[in-house]
Amino acid sequence: MNDMGPPRFATTRNATPVEAAQRDLLLADPGFGRVFTDHMVTIRYADGRGWHDAAVTARGPISIDPACSVLHYAQEIFEGMKAYRAADGAPVLFRPDANARRFRASAERMAMAQLPEDLFIEAVERLVRIDADWIPAAGAGSLYLRPFMFASEVFLGVKPSSEYLFMVIASSVGGYFKGGKPAITLWASEDFTRAAPGGTGAAKCGGNYAASLLAQAQATEKGCDQVVFLDAVERKWVEELGGMNIFFLFDDGSMITPPLGGTILPGITRDSIITLARDQGIEVREERYSIDQWREDAASGRLRECFACGTAAVVTPIGEVKTTGGSFTIGGAQAGELTMKLRAQLTGIQAGTEPDPHGWLHRVARD
Ligand SMILES: *Cc1c(COP(=O)(O)O)cnc(C)c1O
């Protein structure tokens, strides 16, 4: 650890920020992950020196050595979170403490230096504050924040890096899925798995995504929006999508979501939905659910609704599942009623139009 205390941030404002009129044009239809703000945060770590050189600077390319170890051994983790505008226009974050904690857990699994949680939150807050004009108006979108960290030691030996670069960038976003269909279609991959017991499935690391891309490409080829992965051992239990958790809603009013346990990413949206559902007396079971049961329950009507959830896509109805053995639809491939109610509750809390009984909103203090 750094015994000189937490690093102080040096701030250098972007000398040529995007003009307000141009920014308004970009914010009119930002899509996802293409429109970036004027600034970024960097903090460096070195063994023996701790966290140092914390800075907010103009967003721009970074230069790394070709032997930078992340390029070879993929020691990299990230987070995804959003800033919204409160009714009074002030920027707010949703459960940033949970992202900070998960970032540390991911770092631990990947044998990386663990960024103190308060420093993580301070870094995110500083970027949101300096780029607050990039937060779309309430209801029009949000500012997606991407904290990430990678092994930056220049060394080809295989070992945990002795140096890391932590960064935060931000992107103004609208909706995640294009096309405006009421519900998405999933491809159930039988060829590929996302995570195995003892592996890195519970860590938010880039490598998990790299491993999911071929399955995602197959899903796209089959005309599906996303891939849903089955467990790696028996190849029958539904786990999650490439970047979203999954919920099943039944005709008796209860819900199931697959249990965490190392192969599923502990989503903050997943946890929030479980809490909101239980608050209103809905029985939520964290229980294994098989692809065969899914098909059977969709056909019998026992399964009423199904949705995926995550920060980027919020709560997204699932209407159809395709497999090599045929496809089946859920609830007439329409958005389910309870699904949309839970979605409205969650987005209402984030927008400040619904009560926040669990204190999930975090106001970003002014300078
Ligand atoms: C990030 C992520 C999720 C969703 O997590 P949230 O905290 O809800 O955004 C789900 N699954 C995977 C694999 C992820 O990487």
Image (spheres, helix red, strand yellow):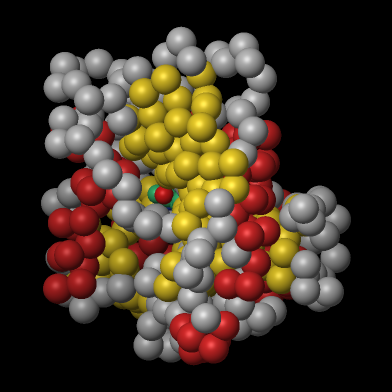
**Residue located 32% across and 47% down the image:** 62
Note whether 175 is above or below 313 in the view shown: below
Q: Quadrant of residue 205?
A: top left
Residue 344 percent across, percent down from the top left: 68, 75
Is residue 314 something that shows in the picture?
no
Depth check: 176 or 260 in front? 176
Can you give x and y, in whole percent of width and height, for residue 111 in the image?
38, 21
* Left or right of 74 in this view: 329: right
Quarter of the image with the N terminus is top right
With 117 as the anchor, is 46 left or right in this view?
left
Vertical order, 267 against 220 (above or below): above
Q: Which residue sits at x=62%, y=12%?
A: 3
Q: Residue furthest front?
A: 15
Q: Is residue 137 visible?
A: yes
Q: How many marks?
A: 0
Q: Where, by quadrant of the figure, is residue 181 drawn?
A: bottom left
Name which residue lies at 85% across and 56% down.
357
Q: Residue at x 61, y 39 (%)?
A: 9
- Relative depth, front residue between 204 and 57: 57
Q: Relative to 133, say whether 167 is above or below.
A: above
**Residue 98, x across and y down, in percent:** 63, 42
Is 221 rendered above or below residue 22?
Answer: above
The foreground one among 25 and 145 is: 25
Across and down, in percent, residue 51 comes to 52, 25
